Each structure stands twice: as structure tokens, then as C-alpha cells.
Amino acid sequence: MKAKPLLNIKSLKEQVYEYLRDAMRRGEILPGSVIDMEETSARLGVSKTPLRDALLQLEMEGFVAILPRRKVVVNVLSLEDIKNYYEIIGALESTALLRALDLLTEADLEHMRRLNTEMKASIDGDDFDRYYEKNLAFHDVFLSRCGNANLLKIVNNMKRRLYDFPRQQGFVKEWEQASIGEHAALIGLIAARNKEAASSHVRDVHWSFSVQEKFISQYYQRAASVLKS
């Protein structure tokens, strides 16, 4: 009897993509490993076409490299990658904030304050997943108002690359606490309608690799070891 596919055949390529991304997030598929297309397609009960399409999307997003003879290698995130992503995200988020700041209402600011409070509660409760989701939502308040969907897509993909590959277990609490303080300072600058200072704060403090490096080196222990090898 033929095994029942693990995936719903509706939107199959998207489902294969989400399955692989979730496996990467959970650490079931690790950086540096090889994805066997034959084994994976058989295990999921799908043909190679949706699997290949999903892998092509993952390659465009920087998660895997497709090599000759159907070899697919899961990319390792190095400290140099992290530094580059921070520089790009900082530049894009600061640009987005410049465009969005005049559109942010008092209700938006109150939403940001509430999300920041919920981030602190998540730290106190040792719930990193909740902290992470609230952190994304905080930034999305102004990112979603910038009027540039492509910018938002790039930033969100880079954040997934930074934090979901796989998602690290446990906190660097000093980092999360510092981030909450940076968020509070940003809210104050937005409330004062100080565009240049708010934009600079996002780029030159919140997403500055040099400012955050001591925390980054703790969080990305695997990336640090790869860089030294």
C-alpha cells in the first residue's frame, strides 16, 4: 500500500518550502548538511518538481546552495554574513522609518509601547519565541507604513536568515534588555517627530554590528566557531 503523503497536495511547492523552512528553524536540518532530493521527495510523498521549486526559492533567499549532480548544501551563517545582514537591515529600516514617520499615529506609538512591554514580559517568562514574534511586530509597525512592499520582504527574509536557522535556544538576556531600552528610545524620538535622530538610532545603534557585537558573539556561538575554523 502506497504511503500517504505527509503534505496536502494543494499549493504543494509552498507547503514543501514551509516544511523545509520549519525543519531548519527547529534544527532538524542543520547548516552545513546535505539535503538528499531522492530521500526527501520519497519521505514527503511528492515528486521532485515541487521539491526542486522549493529548493530554488530557498537558494534565492540564501538558505541553500544547489550544486551539480543534484547536491543541495545548507548554507552556514558566518559572522561575516551576520555583519553584512546587519548593515543591510539597518540601512533599509532607517530608510523605511524616514518614509513612515509622519504617517505614524499616537495609536501606532501606543501599539509599539505595548509590544515593548510584552517583550519584557516574555523575557521574564523565559519565552523566547513570544519575545521574537513581539519584536518582529514592533518593527513591522513602521515598516508596514513605508509603502515599499519589496523592502519589507527583503528585511523579513534577512531576519529569518539571522534568527531561524536554526532558532537558538535560550536568551542572552542582557541583549534582549538592551534591545527593549533601544526600542523605548526609538519611540521617544518618533513621538518627538525627530526623523533624522530616529533613523540614525535604527541604523547606527539598533542594527549596528559594532554596537551589538558583544551580544552577537554570544548568541551565534556556532557562527563564531565556523569563522575560526
Image (cartoon, rainbow, N blue to C red):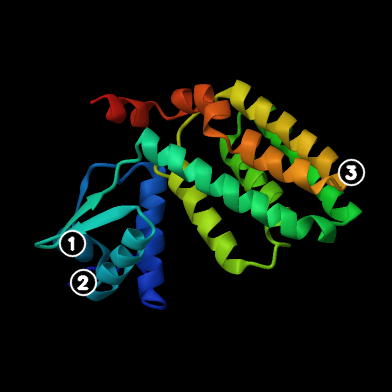
Type of the residue with mark 1: Met
Type of the residue with mark 3: Ala
Q: Is residue 20 above or below residue 128?
A: below
From the viewer's perspective, tell me whether residue 91 is left or right of residue 107: left
SS at badge 1: helix
- Residue name at image x 32 percent, y 44 percent: 28
Where is residue 91? Give x, y as percent: 58, 49
Q: CA distance from mark 3 to mark 2?
A: 55 Å
Type of the residue with mark 2: Lys
- Residue name at image x 59 percent, y 41 percent: 132
From the viewer's perspective, tell me whether residue 29 is left or right of residue 11: left
- Residue name at image x 38 percent, y 36 percent: 80
Q: Of the two numbered discs 2 and 1 on the same chain, state the one appearing first in sequence.
A: 1
The residue wearing badge 1 is 37
SS at badge 2: helix
Q: Is residue 119 above or below residue 111?
A: above
SS at badge 3: loop
Q: CA distance from mark 2 to mark 1?
A: 7 Å
The residue wearing badge 2 is 48
Outermost residue to the bottom: 10
Where is residue 185? Give x, y as percent: 78, 34
The residue wearing badge 3 is 192
Where is residue 84? Give x, y as percent: 44, 42
Picture quadrant where residue 56 is located: bottom left
Mark 1 residue crowding within 10 angstroms, few (<14) / some (14–19) / many (20+):
some
Picture quadrant where residue 117 is located: top right
Where is residue 19? Give x, y as percent: 37, 59
Give the quarter of the figure containing the N terminus. bottom left
Q: Of the two numbered discs 3 and 2 on the same chain, state the one appearing first in sequence.
A: 2
